[in-house]
Image (cartoon, rainbow, N blue to C red):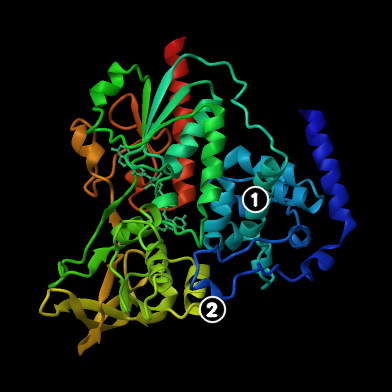
Amino acid sequence: MNTDNNRDAKWREELRSALSAKERTSIPRAVIPQLDPKFRVHSNHEVNQGLSQAQAVLEATRCLDCPDPQCIQGCPVSIAIPTFIKNIERGEILTAAKVLKQTSALPAVCGRVCPQEKQCESRCIYNKMKKQPVAIGYLERFAADFERENIKANNIELRPSAVEKNGMNIAVVGSGPAGLSFAGDMIKKGYNVTVYEALHEIGGVLKYGIPEFRLPNVVVEAEIDGLRAEGVNFVKDCVIGKTISYDQLHQLGYDGIFVASGAGLPRFMGIPGENFIGIMSANEYLTRINLMGAGRPGEDTPVLKGNRVAVIGGGNTAMDSVRTALRQGSKTAMIVYRRSLEEMPARVEEVHHAQEEGVEFMTLCNPIEYLADEKGRVRAMKVQRMELGEPDASGRRSPVPIEGAIEEIEVDLVIVSVGVSPNPLIPNAIPELEISRRGTIVVNEESMRSSIYDIYAGGDIVRGGATVILAMGDGRRAAAAMDKELMKQEK
Ligand SMILES: Cc1cc2nc3c(=O)[nH]c(=O)nc-3n(C[C@H](O)[C@H](O)[C@H](O)COP(=O)(O)OP(=O)(O)OC[C@H]3O[C@@H](n4cnc5c(N)ncnc54)[C@H](O)[C@@H]3O)c2cc1C
Protein backbone atom coordinates (compact mmCIF):
# COMPACT_ATOMS: atom_id res chain seq x y z
CA MET A 1 0.00 0.00 0.00
CA ASN A 2 2.75 2.36 1.00
CA THR A 3 4.70 1.44 -2.13
CA ASP A 4 1.60 2.25 -4.24
CA ASN A 5 1.19 5.61 -2.49
CA ASN A 6 4.86 6.42 -2.98
CA ARG A 7 4.68 5.49 -6.65
CA ASP A 8 1.54 7.66 -7.12
CA ALA A 9 3.15 10.60 -5.32
CA LYS A 10 6.25 10.26 -7.53
CA TRP A 11 4.51 10.32 -10.91
CA ARG A 12 2.23 13.13 -9.76
CA GLU A 13 5.22 15.18 -8.70
CA GLU A 14 6.82 14.49 -12.09
CA LEU A 15 3.66 15.65 -13.87
CA ARG A 16 3.50 18.78 -11.72
CA SER A 17 7.03 19.80 -12.58
CA ALA A 18 6.59 18.99 -16.30
CA LEU A 19 4.59 22.21 -16.86
CA SER A 20 4.31 25.41 -14.83
CA ALA A 21 1.00 26.53 -13.36
CA LYS A 22 1.13 29.49 -15.75
CA GLU A 23 1.44 27.17 -18.74
CA ARG A 24 -1.41 25.01 -17.49
CA THR A 25 -3.76 27.92 -16.77
CA SER A 26 -3.13 29.43 -20.19
CA ILE A 27 -4.76 26.42 -21.90
CA PRO A 28 -8.39 27.24 -22.81
CA ARG A 29 -11.13 24.92 -21.53
CA ALA A 30 -12.04 22.14 -23.98
CA VAL A 31 -15.14 22.65 -26.09
CA ILE A 32 -17.09 19.41 -26.40
CA PRO A 33 -18.09 18.60 -30.00
CA GLN A 34 -21.85 18.82 -30.45
CA LEU A 35 -24.30 17.94 -33.19
CA ASP A 36 -25.55 20.90 -35.21
CA PRO A 37 -28.85 22.14 -33.71
CA LYS A 38 -30.55 22.13 -37.14
CA PHE A 39 -29.72 18.45 -37.61
CA ARG A 40 -30.14 17.20 -34.05
CA VAL A 41 -33.59 18.64 -33.58
CA HIS A 42 -34.85 16.09 -36.10
CA SER A 43 -33.01 13.16 -34.57
CA ASN A 44 -32.57 11.34 -31.31
CA HIS A 45 -28.76 11.17 -31.57
CA GLU A 46 -26.79 12.23 -28.54
CA VAL A 47 -26.13 15.99 -28.68
CA ASN A 48 -22.74 16.00 -26.93
CA GLN A 49 -20.32 13.83 -28.83
CA GLY A 50 -17.58 13.47 -26.19
CA LEU A 51 -13.97 14.69 -26.13
CA SER A 52 -11.32 13.09 -28.32
CA GLN A 53 -8.36 11.56 -26.46
CA ALA A 54 -6.13 14.48 -27.47
CA GLN A 55 -8.71 16.97 -26.16
CA ALA A 56 -9.11 15.02 -22.93
CA VAL A 57 -5.38 14.84 -22.26
CA LEU A 58 -5.02 18.57 -22.91
CA GLU A 59 -7.99 19.37 -20.67
CA ALA A 60 -6.53 17.14 -17.93
CA THR A 61 -3.32 19.15 -18.24
CA ARG A 62 -5.23 22.23 -17.07
CA CYS A 63 -5.85 20.63 -13.64
CA LEU A 64 -3.35 22.06 -11.15
CA ASP A 65 -3.57 19.00 -8.86
CA CYS A 66 -4.20 21.33 -5.90
CA PRO A 67 -2.81 20.23 -2.53
CA ASP A 68 -6.26 20.76 -0.95
CA PRO A 69 -8.63 19.97 -3.85
CA GLN A 70 -11.98 21.63 -3.24
CA CYS A 71 -13.57 19.87 -6.23
CA ILE A 72 -13.75 16.69 -4.13
CA GLN A 73 -15.74 18.58 -1.48
CA GLY A 74 -18.18 19.63 -4.18
CA CYS A 75 -18.83 16.03 -5.29
CA PRO A 76 -21.64 14.31 -3.35
CA VAL A 77 -19.78 10.96 -3.56
CA SER A 78 -16.28 12.44 -3.05
CA ILE A 79 -14.72 11.11 -6.26
CA ALA A 80 -10.89 11.39 -6.15
CA ILE A 81 -11.13 13.96 -8.94
CA PRO A 82 -7.49 15.11 -9.29
CA THR A 83 -6.32 11.46 -9.19
CA PHE A 84 -8.52 10.38 -12.08
CA ILE A 85 -7.72 13.54 -14.04
CA LYS A 86 -3.96 13.19 -13.60
CA ASN A 87 -4.21 9.59 -14.81
CA ILE A 88 -5.81 10.92 -17.98
CA GLU A 89 -2.99 13.44 -18.36
CA ARG A 90 -0.39 10.67 -18.28
CA GLY A 91 -2.42 8.54 -20.72
CA GLU A 92 -3.52 5.91 -18.15
CA ILE A 93 -7.17 6.15 -19.08
CA LEU A 94 -8.21 2.72 -17.80
CA THR A 95 -6.66 3.55 -14.42
CA ALA A 96 -8.61 6.82 -14.46
CA ALA A 97 -11.81 4.83 -15.06
CA LYS A 98 -10.89 2.53 -12.17
CA VAL A 99 -10.44 5.50 -9.85
CA LEU A 100 -13.92 6.75 -10.83
CA LYS A 101 -15.48 3.33 -10.19
CA GLN A 102 -14.10 3.31 -6.63
CA THR A 103 -16.72 5.84 -5.57
CA SER A 104 -19.18 6.19 -8.45
CA ALA A 105 -21.17 3.22 -9.71
CA LEU A 106 -22.28 4.99 -12.90
CA PRO A 107 -19.54 7.38 -14.11
CA ALA A 108 -20.62 7.30 -17.77
CA VAL A 109 -24.07 8.39 -16.62
CA CYS A 110 -22.87 11.01 -14.14
CA GLY A 111 -20.39 12.45 -16.65
CA ARG A 112 -23.42 13.19 -18.82
CA VAL A 113 -26.16 14.27 -16.44
CA CYS A 114 -24.63 15.58 -13.20
CA PRO A 115 -25.00 19.32 -12.56
CA GLN A 116 -21.20 19.76 -12.39
CA GLU A 117 -21.52 23.54 -12.63
CA LYS A 118 -23.21 23.49 -9.21
CA GLN A 119 -21.00 20.76 -7.74
CA CYS A 120 -17.34 19.84 -8.42
CA GLU A 121 -16.69 22.43 -11.14
CA SER A 122 -18.12 25.23 -8.99
CA ARG A 123 -15.30 24.58 -6.48
CA CYS A 124 -12.46 24.44 -9.02
CA ILE A 125 -9.62 26.86 -8.26
CA TYR A 126 -9.92 28.32 -11.77
CA ASN A 127 -13.13 30.09 -10.68
CA LYS A 128 -11.08 32.13 -8.22
CA MET A 129 -8.78 33.15 -11.10
CA LYS A 130 -11.88 34.22 -13.07
CA LYS A 131 -11.20 31.46 -15.56
CA GLN A 132 -13.41 28.61 -16.70
CA PRO A 133 -13.16 25.56 -14.41
CA VAL A 134 -11.56 22.30 -15.48
CA ALA A 135 -14.20 20.34 -17.43
CA ILE A 136 -14.47 17.57 -14.82
CA GLY A 137 -17.75 16.22 -16.18
CA TYR A 138 -16.44 15.90 -19.75
CA LEU A 139 -13.33 14.13 -18.43
CA GLU A 140 -15.39 11.74 -16.30
CA ARG A 141 -17.49 10.87 -19.31
CA PHE A 142 -14.39 10.45 -21.48
CA ALA A 143 -12.71 7.97 -19.08
CA ALA A 144 -15.88 5.94 -18.55
CA ASP A 145 -16.65 5.80 -22.30
CA PHE A 146 -13.06 4.83 -23.05
CA GLU A 147 -13.34 1.88 -20.67
CA ARG A 148 -16.67 0.76 -22.15
CA GLU A 149 -15.37 0.98 -25.71
CA ASN A 150 -12.21 -0.86 -24.70
CA ILE A 151 -14.27 -3.72 -23.24
CA LYS A 152 -16.33 -3.89 -26.45
CA ALA A 153 -13.44 -3.58 -28.89
CA ASN A 154 -11.36 -6.24 -27.15
CA ASN A 155 -14.26 -8.59 -26.39
CA ILE A 156 -13.30 -8.51 -22.74
CA GLU A 157 -15.48 -10.91 -20.79
CA LEU A 158 -17.00 -9.36 -17.67
CA ARG A 159 -16.62 -11.70 -14.75
CA PRO A 160 -18.50 -12.21 -11.49
CA SER A 161 -16.95 -10.66 -8.42
CA ALA A 162 -14.19 -12.88 -7.01
CA VAL A 163 -15.40 -12.27 -3.44
CA GLU A 164 -16.55 -15.40 -1.61
CA LYS A 165 -20.35 -15.56 -1.17
CA ASN A 166 -21.59 -15.12 2.40
CA GLY A 167 -24.92 -16.91 1.77
CA MET A 168 -27.11 -13.93 2.66
CA ASN A 169 -29.84 -12.64 0.34
CA ILE A 170 -30.74 -9.04 -0.32
CA ALA A 171 -33.76 -7.62 -2.16
CA VAL A 172 -33.69 -4.24 -3.89
CA VAL A 173 -36.95 -2.49 -4.79
CA GLY A 174 -36.46 -0.35 -7.89
CA SER A 175 -33.70 -0.29 -10.50
CA GLY A 176 -32.86 3.43 -10.76
CA PRO A 177 -29.44 4.82 -9.82
CA ALA A 178 -30.01 4.31 -6.07
CA GLY A 179 -30.94 0.63 -6.51
CA LEU A 180 -28.18 -0.02 -9.04
CA SER A 181 -25.40 1.50 -6.97
CA PHE A 182 -26.62 -0.34 -3.85
CA ALA A 183 -26.77 -3.62 -5.79
CA GLY A 184 -23.26 -3.09 -7.20
CA ASP A 185 -21.78 -2.57 -3.75
CA MET A 186 -23.60 -5.47 -2.10
CA ILE A 187 -22.65 -7.99 -4.79
CA LYS A 188 -19.00 -7.00 -4.31
CA LYS A 189 -19.38 -7.65 -0.59
CA GLY A 190 -20.47 -11.27 -1.23
CA TYR A 191 -24.28 -11.06 -0.94
CA ASN A 192 -26.80 -12.62 -3.33
CA VAL A 193 -28.64 -9.60 -4.71
CA THR A 194 -31.98 -9.50 -6.53
CA VAL A 195 -33.33 -6.23 -7.94
CA TYR A 196 -37.11 -6.07 -8.46
CA GLU A 197 -38.37 -3.56 -11.02
CA ALA A 198 -42.02 -2.72 -11.61
CA LEU A 199 -41.47 -1.72 -15.25
CA HIS A 200 -40.39 -3.91 -18.17
CA GLU A 201 -36.98 -2.19 -18.41
CA ILE A 202 -34.20 -1.82 -15.87
CA GLY A 203 -32.80 1.65 -15.14
CA GLY A 204 -35.54 3.81 -13.56
CA VAL A 205 -35.48 7.43 -14.70
CA LEU A 206 -32.27 6.78 -16.64
CA LYS A 207 -34.42 4.76 -19.06
CA TYR A 208 -37.95 6.09 -18.85
CA GLY A 209 -37.20 9.75 -18.15
CA ILE A 210 -33.93 11.10 -19.54
CA PRO A 211 -34.09 11.00 -23.35
CA GLU A 212 -31.70 9.23 -25.69
CA PHE A 213 -30.35 12.56 -27.05
CA ARG A 214 -28.92 13.25 -23.60
CA LEU A 215 -28.24 9.78 -22.22
CA PRO A 216 -28.16 6.96 -24.79
CA ASN A 217 -29.62 3.64 -23.66
CA VAL A 218 -26.42 1.79 -24.66
CA VAL A 219 -24.59 3.69 -21.92
CA VAL A 220 -27.13 2.66 -19.28
CA GLU A 221 -27.30 -0.92 -20.63
CA ALA A 222 -23.52 -1.30 -20.38
CA GLU A 223 -23.66 -0.40 -16.68
CA ILE A 224 -26.52 -2.89 -16.13
CA ASP A 225 -24.65 -5.61 -18.08
CA GLY A 226 -21.67 -5.04 -15.80
CA LEU A 227 -23.83 -5.65 -12.72
CA ARG A 228 -25.47 -8.69 -14.33
CA ALA A 229 -22.03 -10.13 -15.09
CA GLU A 230 -21.06 -9.62 -11.48
CA GLY A 231 -24.03 -11.77 -10.50
CA VAL A 232 -26.84 -9.30 -9.71
CA ASN A 233 -30.20 -10.90 -10.50
CA PHE A 234 -32.85 -8.66 -12.10
CA VAL A 235 -36.59 -9.37 -12.01
CA LYS A 236 -38.69 -7.11 -14.25
CA ASP A 237 -42.46 -6.53 -14.29
CA CYS A 238 -42.65 -7.15 -10.55
CA VAL A 239 -44.28 -4.59 -8.26
CA ILE A 240 -43.18 -5.06 -4.67
CA GLY A 241 -46.18 -4.46 -2.44
CA LYS A 242 -48.52 -5.84 -5.14
CA THR A 243 -46.98 -8.78 -7.04
CA ILE A 244 -44.89 -9.76 -4.01
CA SER A 245 -45.72 -8.46 -0.52
CA TYR A 246 -43.23 -7.43 2.16
CA ASP A 247 -44.11 -10.62 4.12
CA GLN A 248 -43.52 -12.72 1.03
CA LEU A 249 -40.06 -11.16 0.65
CA HIS A 250 -39.29 -12.59 4.10
CA GLN A 251 -40.69 -15.97 3.10
CA LEU A 252 -38.35 -15.85 0.10
CA GLY A 253 -35.47 -15.65 2.58
CA TYR A 254 -34.25 -12.07 2.24
CA ASP A 255 -32.04 -10.85 5.07
CA GLY A 256 -32.23 -7.17 4.08
CA ILE A 257 -34.35 -4.96 1.83
CA PHE A 258 -33.31 -1.70 0.16
CA VAL A 259 -36.18 0.44 -1.08
CA ALA A 260 -35.24 2.70 -4.00
CA SER A 261 -38.65 3.20 -5.55
CA GLY A 262 -38.12 6.82 -6.62
CA ALA A 263 -40.44 9.79 -6.92
CA GLY A 264 -42.48 8.87 -9.96
CA LEU A 265 -45.77 10.48 -8.90
CA PRO A 266 -46.33 13.60 -10.99
CA ARG A 267 -47.74 16.79 -9.48
CA PHE A 268 -50.27 19.02 -11.18
CA MET A 269 -51.14 22.66 -10.49
CA GLY A 270 -54.84 22.11 -9.77
CA ILE A 271 -55.97 24.94 -12.07
CA PRO A 272 -59.22 25.02 -14.08
CA GLY A 273 -59.14 22.94 -17.25
CA GLU A 274 -56.12 20.81 -16.31
CA ASN A 275 -58.11 17.66 -17.19
CA PHE A 276 -58.71 18.65 -20.81
CA ILE A 277 -57.48 16.36 -23.58
CA GLY A 278 -53.95 17.32 -24.56
CA ILE A 279 -52.69 18.09 -21.07
CA MET A 280 -50.48 15.47 -19.44
CA SER A 281 -47.63 15.09 -17.00
CA ALA A 282 -44.02 15.09 -18.19
CA ASN A 283 -43.67 11.61 -16.68
CA GLU A 284 -46.44 10.24 -18.86
CA TYR A 285 -45.17 12.03 -21.96
CA LEU A 286 -41.54 10.96 -21.57
CA THR A 287 -42.40 7.38 -20.53
CA ARG A 288 -44.59 6.90 -23.58
CA ILE A 289 -41.80 8.08 -25.86
CA ASN A 290 -38.63 6.83 -24.14
CA LEU A 291 -39.83 3.55 -22.70
CA MET A 292 -42.79 2.57 -24.86
CA GLY A 293 -41.41 3.70 -28.21
CA ALA A 294 -44.25 6.15 -29.05
CA GLY A 295 -43.51 8.14 -32.18
CA ARG A 296 -41.05 5.54 -33.50
CA PRO A 297 -41.96 3.70 -36.73
CA GLY A 298 -43.49 0.28 -36.07
CA GLU A 299 -44.38 1.00 -32.44
CA ASP A 300 -48.01 0.89 -31.26
CA THR A 301 -47.91 3.22 -28.24
CA PRO A 302 -49.84 6.38 -29.07
CA VAL A 303 -48.75 9.86 -28.02
CA LEU A 304 -50.46 13.15 -28.71
CA LYS A 305 -48.51 15.42 -31.01
CA GLY A 306 -48.94 19.14 -30.94
CA ASN A 307 -48.11 22.02 -33.22
CA ARG A 308 -47.89 24.52 -30.36
CA VAL A 309 -46.56 22.79 -27.30
CA ALA A 310 -46.19 24.42 -23.89
CA VAL A 311 -44.15 22.79 -21.16
CA ILE A 312 -44.85 24.15 -17.70
CA GLY A 313 -41.79 24.23 -15.41
CA GLY A 314 -38.08 25.00 -15.48
CA GLY A 315 -36.29 21.84 -14.32
CA ASN A 316 -34.39 19.15 -16.21
CA THR A 317 -37.61 17.23 -16.78
CA ALA A 318 -39.21 20.30 -18.38
CA MET A 319 -36.16 20.80 -20.62
CA ASP A 320 -36.20 17.12 -21.66
CA SER A 321 -39.92 17.34 -22.45
CA VAL A 322 -39.75 20.50 -24.52
CA ARG A 323 -36.78 19.25 -26.56
CA THR A 324 -38.59 15.93 -27.05
CA ALA A 325 -41.66 17.81 -28.32
CA LEU A 326 -39.49 19.47 -30.99
CA ARG A 327 -38.13 16.07 -32.00
CA GLN A 328 -41.73 14.79 -32.23
CA GLY A 329 -42.35 17.45 -34.88
CA SER A 330 -44.02 20.34 -33.05
CA LYS A 331 -43.87 23.68 -34.91
CA THR A 332 -43.24 25.66 -31.73
CA ALA A 333 -42.30 24.44 -28.31
CA MET A 334 -42.11 26.75 -25.32
CA ILE A 335 -41.11 26.66 -21.71
CA VAL A 336 -43.52 28.50 -19.43
CA TYR A 337 -41.77 29.30 -16.16
CA ARG A 338 -42.92 31.51 -13.31
CA ARG A 339 -39.49 32.91 -12.39
CA SER A 340 -36.66 34.21 -14.60
CA LEU A 341 -33.93 32.32 -16.48
CA GLU A 342 -31.45 32.84 -13.61
CA GLU A 343 -33.65 30.94 -11.16
CA MET A 344 -34.24 27.95 -13.44
CA PRO A 345 -33.25 24.72 -11.70
CA ALA A 346 -32.38 22.93 -14.98
CA ARG A 347 -28.72 22.37 -15.83
CA VAL A 348 -27.25 25.40 -17.60
CA GLU A 349 -26.12 23.25 -20.52
CA GLU A 350 -29.63 21.90 -21.07
CA VAL A 351 -31.12 25.39 -21.12
CA HIS A 352 -28.45 26.44 -23.60
CA HIS A 353 -29.08 23.42 -25.83
CA ALA A 354 -32.83 24.09 -25.74
CA GLN A 355 -32.22 27.72 -26.77
CA GLU A 356 -29.98 26.61 -29.63
CA GLU A 357 -32.69 24.23 -30.82
CA GLY A 358 -35.27 27.01 -31.01
CA VAL A 359 -37.25 26.47 -27.81
CA GLU A 360 -39.09 29.66 -26.78
CA PHE A 361 -38.77 30.74 -23.16
CA MET A 362 -41.79 32.44 -21.62
CA THR A 363 -40.32 33.36 -18.26
CA LEU A 364 -42.12 35.19 -15.45
CA CYS A 365 -45.37 33.59 -16.60
CA ASN A 366 -47.69 31.23 -14.77
CA PRO A 367 -50.65 29.37 -16.31
CA ILE A 368 -53.87 30.00 -14.41
CA GLU A 369 -56.48 28.35 -16.64
CA TYR A 370 -56.81 26.19 -19.76
CA LEU A 371 -59.46 26.60 -22.45
CA ALA A 372 -60.73 23.79 -24.70
CA ASP A 373 -62.38 23.43 -28.11
CA GLU A 374 -65.79 21.81 -28.60
CA LYS A 375 -64.19 18.33 -28.46
CA GLY A 376 -62.59 18.99 -25.09
CA ARG A 377 -59.03 19.36 -26.43
CA VAL A 378 -56.96 22.16 -25.04
CA ARG A 379 -56.78 25.14 -27.43
CA ALA A 380 -55.34 27.92 -25.27
CA MET A 381 -54.03 28.81 -21.86
CA LYS A 382 -54.38 31.93 -19.76
CA VAL A 383 -51.10 33.01 -18.25
CA GLN A 384 -50.49 35.44 -15.45
CA ARG A 385 -47.44 37.67 -15.90
CA MET A 386 -45.20 37.74 -12.83
CA GLU A 387 -42.41 39.85 -11.38
CA LEU A 388 -39.74 38.88 -8.88
CA GLY A 389 -40.28 39.75 -5.22
CA GLU A 390 -38.36 38.91 -2.05
CA PRO A 391 -36.31 35.69 -1.77
CA ASP A 392 -38.26 32.70 -0.43
CA ALA A 393 -37.12 29.76 1.74
CA SER A 394 -35.09 28.36 -1.20
CA GLY A 395 -33.16 31.64 -1.43
CA ARG A 396 -34.61 32.35 -4.88
CA ARG A 397 -36.65 35.50 -5.45
CA SER A 398 -40.32 34.55 -5.39
CA PRO A 399 -42.62 35.26 -8.31
CA VAL A 400 -45.38 37.77 -7.59
CA PRO A 401 -48.38 38.24 -9.95
CA ILE A 402 -48.59 41.60 -11.76
CA GLU A 403 -52.15 42.71 -11.26
CA GLY A 404 -54.28 42.53 -14.40
CA ALA A 405 -51.42 41.22 -16.58
CA ILE A 406 -53.16 38.14 -17.97
CA GLU A 407 -52.71 36.88 -21.54
CA GLU A 408 -54.29 34.14 -23.61
CA ILE A 409 -51.87 31.98 -25.59
CA GLU A 410 -52.77 29.37 -28.20
CA VAL A 411 -51.55 25.85 -27.42
CA ASP A 412 -52.66 22.37 -28.48
CA LEU A 413 -50.48 20.26 -26.18
CA VAL A 414 -49.43 21.02 -22.61
CA ILE A 415 -46.86 19.03 -20.66
CA VAL A 416 -46.95 19.71 -16.93
CA SER A 417 -43.57 19.45 -15.26
CA VAL A 418 -43.94 21.16 -11.91
CA GLY A 419 -42.37 18.50 -9.70
CA VAL A 420 -42.89 14.98 -8.48
CA SER A 421 -43.85 13.26 -5.25
CA PRO A 422 -42.50 10.02 -3.80
CA ASN A 423 -43.94 6.82 -5.19
CA PRO A 424 -46.69 5.91 -2.63
CA LEU A 425 -46.73 2.15 -3.34
CA ILE A 426 -44.27 0.95 -0.71
CA PRO A 427 -45.43 3.40 2.00
CA ASN A 428 -49.00 2.20 1.38
CA ALA A 429 -48.03 -1.46 1.35
CA ILE A 430 -46.06 -1.36 4.63
CA PRO A 431 -48.14 0.68 7.11
CA GLU A 432 -45.57 0.28 9.94
CA LEU A 433 -43.00 2.25 7.90
CA GLU A 434 -42.45 5.82 9.17
CA ILE A 435 -43.32 8.29 6.45
CA SER A 436 -42.77 12.05 6.43
CA ARG A 437 -45.48 14.62 5.73
CA ARG A 438 -44.08 14.87 2.18
CA GLY A 439 -44.61 11.14 1.69
CA THR A 440 -40.90 10.25 1.80
CA ILE A 441 -39.56 7.28 3.78
CA VAL A 442 -37.91 8.51 6.98
CA VAL A 443 -34.39 7.13 7.44
CA ASN A 444 -31.36 7.69 9.60
CA GLU A 445 -29.22 9.98 7.42
CA GLU A 446 -26.00 8.11 8.17
CA SER A 447 -27.17 4.54 7.74
CA MET A 448 -30.24 5.05 5.51
CA ARG A 449 -32.07 2.60 7.80
CA SER A 450 -35.82 3.10 8.11
CA SER A 451 -38.09 2.64 11.13
CA ILE A 452 -38.25 -1.08 10.26
CA TYR A 453 -35.08 -2.96 11.21
CA ASP A 454 -34.44 -4.75 7.90
CA ILE A 455 -35.61 -2.01 5.51
CA TYR A 456 -33.15 0.60 4.28
CA ALA A 457 -34.09 3.24 1.72
CA GLY A 458 -32.44 5.86 -0.49
CA GLY A 459 -32.72 8.05 -3.57
CA ASP A 460 -35.82 10.00 -4.48
CA ILE A 461 -38.13 7.93 -2.22
CA VAL A 462 -36.20 9.49 0.68
CA ARG A 463 -35.31 12.90 -0.78
CA GLY A 464 -38.29 13.65 -3.04
CA GLY A 465 -37.08 14.54 -6.56
CA ALA A 466 -33.28 14.99 -6.37
CA THR A 467 -30.35 13.97 -8.57
CA VAL A 468 -28.69 10.86 -9.95
CA ILE A 469 -25.51 11.32 -7.94
CA LEU A 470 -27.34 11.86 -4.65
CA ALA A 471 -29.41 8.73 -5.29
CA MET A 472 -26.22 6.79 -6.01
CA GLY A 473 -24.55 8.14 -2.89
CA ASP A 474 -27.53 6.97 -0.80
CA GLY A 475 -27.24 3.50 -2.31
CA ARG A 476 -23.58 3.34 -1.36
CA ARG A 477 -24.15 4.53 2.22
CA ALA A 478 -27.02 2.09 2.70
CA ALA A 479 -24.91 -0.80 1.40
CA ALA A 480 -22.08 0.00 3.80
CA ALA A 481 -24.46 0.29 6.77
CA MET A 482 -26.53 -2.80 5.96
CA ASP A 483 -23.37 -4.85 5.48
CA LYS A 484 -22.01 -3.67 8.83
CA GLU A 485 -25.28 -4.56 10.57
CA LEU A 486 -25.66 -7.99 8.94
CA MET A 487 -22.05 -8.87 9.66
CA LYS A 488 -22.58 -7.89 13.30
CA GLN A 489 -25.62 -10.20 13.47
CA GLU A 490 -23.62 -13.04 11.92
CA LYS A 491 -21.03 -13.00 14.67
C1 LIG B 1 -36.90 13.58 -17.08
C2 LIG B 1 -35.92 13.64 -15.95
C3 LIG B 1 -34.69 14.21 -16.16
C4 LIG B 1 -33.74 14.25 -15.14
N1 LIG B 1 -32.52 14.78 -15.39
C5 LIG B 1 -31.57 14.73 -14.43
C6 LIG B 1 -30.26 15.22 -14.69
O1 LIG B 1 -29.95 15.71 -15.77
N2 LIG B 1 -29.33 15.11 -13.71
C7 LIG B 1 -29.61 14.54 -12.50
O2 LIG B 1 -28.72 14.39 -11.67
N3 LIG B 1 -30.87 14.11 -12.22
C8 LIG B 1 -31.84 14.19 -13.15
N4 LIG B 1 -33.12 13.75 -12.86
C9 LIG B 1 -33.40 13.24 -11.51
C10 LIG B 1 -32.85 11.81 -11.34
O3 LIG B 1 -33.09 11.06 -12.49
C11 LIG B 1 -33.46 11.15 -10.12
O4 LIG B 1 -33.14 11.93 -8.98
C12 LIG B 1 -32.92 9.72 -9.92
O5 LIG B 1 -33.20 8.91 -11.04
C13 LIG B 1 -33.50 9.08 -8.66
O6 LIG B 1 -33.04 7.76 -8.60
P1 LIG B 1 -33.83 6.63 -7.79
O7 LIG B 1 -33.03 5.39 -7.96
O8 LIG B 1 -34.12 7.10 -6.43
O9 LIG B 1 -35.25 6.50 -8.51
P2 LIG B 1 -35.73 6.23 -9.99
O10 LIG B 1 -34.69 6.51 -10.99
O11 LIG B 1 -37.03 6.93 -10.10
O12 LIG B 1 -36.01 4.67 -10.02
C14 LIG B 1 -37.02 4.10 -9.23
C15 LIG B 1 -37.47 2.79 -9.86
O13 LIG B 1 -38.26 2.06 -8.92
C16 LIG B 1 -39.31 1.41 -9.60
N5 LIG B 1 -40.35 1.11 -8.62
C17 LIG B 1 -41.15 1.98 -7.96
N6 LIG B 1 -41.96 1.32 -7.11
C18 LIG B 1 -41.64 0.01 -7.23
C19 LIG B 1 -42.15 -1.17 -6.61
N7 LIG B 1 -43.11 -1.12 -5.68
N8 LIG B 1 -41.64 -2.37 -6.98
C20 LIG B 1 -40.65 -2.43 -7.93
N9 LIG B 1 -40.14 -1.34 -8.54
C21 LIG B 1 -40.63 -0.13 -8.18
C22 LIG B 1 -39.71 2.43 -10.64
O14 LIG B 1 -40.42 1.82 -11.71
C23 LIG B 1 -38.36 2.98 -11.08
O15 LIG B 1 -37.84 2.24 -12.16
C24 LIG B 1 -34.07 13.73 -13.86
C25 LIG B 1 -35.36 13.18 -13.64
C26 LIG B 1 -36.27 13.14 -14.66
C27 LIG B 1 -37.64 12.55 -14.41
Along the horizontal axis of the image, is 187 left or right of 297? right
**Residue shown at 22%/70% (left/top)?**
278
**Residue shown at 52%/44% (left/top)?**
221
Mark 1 beta carbon near ligand 1 (under 8 Å): no
Residue 395 visible within the image:
no
**Residue shown at 28%/68% (left/top)?**
304
- Image quarter in which the N terminus is found: top right
Q: Which residue is mark 2?
A: 38
Q: Label 2 is placed on what type of residue?
A: Lys
Could you say which quadrant of the image residue 142 lies in? bottom right
In depth, the one of 255 and 109 nearer the eye is: 109
- As displayed, is residue 280 above or below residue 234? below
How far is mark 1 from mark 2, CA to CA? 26 Å
Q: Which residue is mark 1?
A: 145
Residue 322 visible within the image:
yes
Q: Secondary structure at mark 1?
A: helix
Query: Callout 1: 10 Å neighbours few (<14), some, many (20+)?
Result: some
Q: Secondary structure at mark 2?
A: helix
Along the horizontal axis of the image, is 192 left or right of 28? left
The x, y position of residue 169, in whole percent, is 42, 20
Q: Label 1 is placed on what type of residue?
A: Asp
